[in-house]
Amino acid sequence: MKRQRSTITTFITISNISDQAYLILTMEIEWPGRWDHVKKILERTGPFAHPDFEPSPETLNFLKDTCKVLVIGAGGLGCELLKDLALMGFRDIHVIDMDTIDVSNLNRQFLFRAKDVGRAKADVAAAFINSRVPGCRVTPHFAKIQDFDEQFYRDFHIVVCGLDSIIARRWINGMLISMLKYEEGVLDQSSLIPMVDGGTEGFKGNARVILPGITACVECTLGLYPPQVNFPLCTIAHTPRLPEHCIEFVRILLWPKEEPFGAGVSIDGDDPQHIKWILEKSQERASQYNIAGVNYRLTQGVVKRIMPAVASTNAVISAACATEVFKLATSCCAPLNNYMNFNDTNGVYTYTFEAEKLVCCLACSNTPQVLTFTETDKLQEILTHLQVNATYQMKSPGVTTSVEGKNKTLYMQTVKSIEEKTRENLKKTLKELGLEDGQELYVADVTTPNTLTFKLHLGARMDNF
Amino acid sequence: MATLQNKGAGIDKNNKYDRQLRLWGDHGQSSLETARVCLINATATGTEILKNLVLPGVGSFTIVDGQKVQGEDVGNNFFLTVDSIGKSRAQVATELLSELNEDVSGDFLEENVDDLLQKNPAFLSSFTTVIATQLSEKTLLNLGKVLWERNIPLVVCRCYGFIGYLRLVLKEHTIIESHPDNTHEDLRLDRPFNGLKEFCDKLNLDTMNKKDHSHTPWLVLLYKYLQIWEQKHGGKLPSTYKEKTAFKELIKEGLRKNDEGVPDDEENFDEAIKSVNSSLHATSIPSEIQDLFNDPACLELHPESKNFWVMMRALKEFTRNEGLGFLPVRGTIPDMTSDSERYIQLQTVYRDQAEIDALAVAGHVHSLLHTIGRDEPLKPDRTKKPGTITDSEIKTFCRNAAFLNVVRCRSLQQEYDHDIIYLEELSRHLIDEESPDEGDDTVLYVLLRAADKFFAEFNHFPGYFDNTVDADVPKLKACLNKLILDWGLSSTIKDDYIQEICRYGASELHSVSAFMGGVTAQEVIKVITGQFVPINNTFIYNAQRQTSTTITL
């Protein structure tokens, strides 16, 4: 804990003064009393303040003029985060979102109106905040997080995520960890960018603070994310029992077979014609089996894998995240250590705990991972292991290695031509592929921005399981 | 009084509200859309609460606030603008909140709540729920009295530095659909009903072909092997860990074997074994429901009884008659490995029994309504008359029979009487037996009470002015000590807390307001929809540690 605290202070004191610092304040963006509430906390100290906290007007100036925060996601959480941060004194805020506004966003993403449907979320959200909160400069990026490199991310003091995708969370987590610098095994604190992360589903949510390299990261706690439920294909094809089974039958098996909207047209969950077709076919199948309950809402829910969402939970989780960003930036009190769960189905319940760092974490342990297999195991088994093992949960790993100083691709799924060329390798044993004990395997996957290095250990494979 | 009404722009509500309709259904949405809420004081906390009610489509809101917008209000409130400084806070907030949703109509009344309570308290009678933020103790108690007398739910929210406070004040709130997260299935394997017996007895595991054997639902497997077990064990179910382990072995023996005597892989058997621990619990009426059966409101029905209590009494009558000591069958089964046909048949077996049970409950409902003189028949157009109870209401009630819930809060007056119930609850939370220094966040409630006492005495909150922060510390300590002495509490509160409260100086931090705005709005939605379970009755949020506690004061 002690170590953690000093980290945060260091990160504040070493922070670069940005070009826009000491912005000339005019009456348009300052007025008497504007910061009265925040100032009480920042210009007075208290027994629960961070030990290195110095009450001073400079802290608010730091928030306003220097501190640069990145908000990832301009959806349910992102809209709230932008508002919360802007009213807590942050002004240099960037927001990244790759989505456009849909009608179903309007029940909670309060910066958007009916007339904005179809426009980029990041643009509309930024414009709204900038016009409502004088002096605030939100810079929108209608893009994917993967479109930016280390250089871009290095500029921020804090990153806060309001994402609905686990893959994106893992990717940014990997990015921030890859930016850590170590000197003789000791972390260079100036390379650390804290990450605050929120997530919601219905009435449940969580907020957490990650100090990359120091506290548990996203990969350390992958087990906290429930695996996605997929119905077995044989159930869908032969023994449907639930309305969902019927909808999945149409989505997975019937659509590609019948191509109802032309060859190669894939399902668009937002196209009412597509949903209507799936609904009708699903109802046909359901009636064959006497299954009740296939309707439009369920069909769309299954096809789009819709998570229920409501304004209140998003407000709660974003607010908790914004409070943590404020604490990290100002040291006005110790940050959350390090995970809070929230649920207000039955009363209002929170559970706060310290998620533990995984000693052998793939992303943040800074030690190479060992994969133990036998010579007679096939390459496919390594790939399956990387996908199903709870600590890896990769999506479509590609594996390369180095043979006599040359790079050799063992398997890669993401590029079609390479996939075709390397597909045969999957059935080959590690011996046949010429892999030796101690060989390094380089693995790339959508869940991480970096290629991960594994050491292959050929022996008894028990260790993996 | 001014009204700002928006015209609908014709967006399909099914699309707009899709993500929340999946949580509280069309009927929950309809309750929300007919609700009228009143907000007292358009503070940052107040507008954040309203935002989270306007977005999901509450029917209407009315803001009561006599203040003019000040610079500090615009600093922490998203629904005020700098050019509105000096204008009516109620009006400006109403205008900006109304922009969020064209289906919602917003009104305001530019008047201090103290004046309103004095001149026209009946104004508040028309609301479904009243929300009050950042009120002084004195005003709050007055408001609480007026609403308690009129039986209108009051939700009080307050943000103070890094502290959030929420209090629900209502006489009685009944919940049919509490949507519990994790529940036992209601399968009745320990006392199978006739339909289930007939269905299972028709099936013969020994004569089935291989495919049917491996596709027999595990429910049927458990039924079959329980019969074998009961024969061997004098009609008793496996209950201890040891017995359950033995029972699992018994099921395992039933696996088909191939020619070499090696057991086949049969998924349904795996599922049956896995289900032993969760599915063999004895069917019983939960103690919470037993308590409701003995509640005076259930025992003493009268012409004005809520439908909830009429149905509760009917449920009780059912358990004493047709139900043979048990609640109606819920009528749902989990998904399990099976061929489609037998799964659907089994599902129908449970659903049919649920229908039969609900019909029996309906019989009791109708005779009870007759007894209390409310047995008017349906109107010719089959619409519901007030006071009558439809079959679909009864079905929903029966399906949720094990999760019915009633929340009764104590009034603010009862809280401020500091009776023994109050003091015991406080003590229990303030002193942790294992580590006496570490009570829960209830300490923050006591500190807020001390700050209110300070305010009553000095007419400003401790630390409100920059130049009196240090001087206010000993004064606040004196207030706190007096409170604790008056209450006769044995706990001590660390000086650190007193200093910290003076640091806060009654500041309202936006991110704390936003947190409490979310929590409070959801409690209001629970009150309005009658779904999910609200707090009883005080929630304290500690934003410093990101912890919280709920206490019944």
Image (spheres, coloured by chain):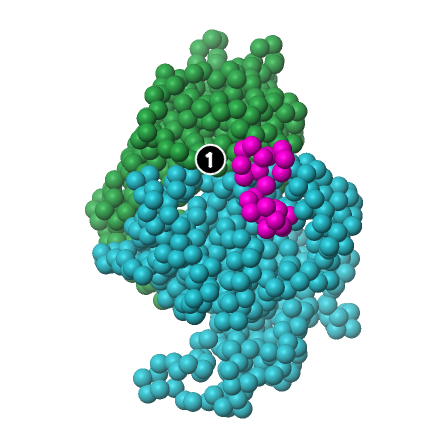
Above/below status of B378 relative to A410: below
Decide which of A266, A362 is in the foreground and name it.
A362
The picture places residue A82, in percent across and down from the top left corner, at 39, 36
Give the residue at x 53% y 68%: B148
Decide which of B121, A305 is in the foreground and name it.
B121
The picture places residue A38, in percent across and down from the top left corner, at 48, 34
Give the residue at x 44% y 45%: B44
The picture places residue B401, in percent across and down from the top left corner, at 56, 71
The C terminus of chain B, quarter of image? bottom right
Q: Main secondary structure of the magenta part?
A: helix
In the image, taking residue A166 as reference, residue A96 lies left or right, namely left
The magenta region covers B448-472
Decide which of B85, B44 is in the foreground and name it.
B85
Q: Residue furthest front?
A: B458
Decide which of B507, B249 is in the foreground and name it.
B507
Chain corresponding to cyan in the figure = B
Above/below status of A406 relative to A248: above
Q: Residue furthest left?
A: A262
Residue A361 belongs to magenta span: no
Q: Colour of chain A?
A: green
Residue B460 belongs to magenta span: yes
In the image, taking residue B372 as reference, residue B97 lies left or right, namely left
Give the residue at x 34% y 50%: B88
Please say whether residue A190 is visible from this viewpoint.
Answer: yes
The N terminus of chain B, quarter of image? bottom left
Instruction: Identify which amino acid the numbered label 1 is placed on.
Output: Asp
**Residue under mark 1: which chain is it in?**
A
Crowdedness near tag 1: few (<14), some (14–19) or many (≥20) residues, C-alpha within 10 Å: some
In the image, taking residue B309 as reference, residue B229 lies left or right, namely right
Would you name the residue on which mark 1 appears? A36
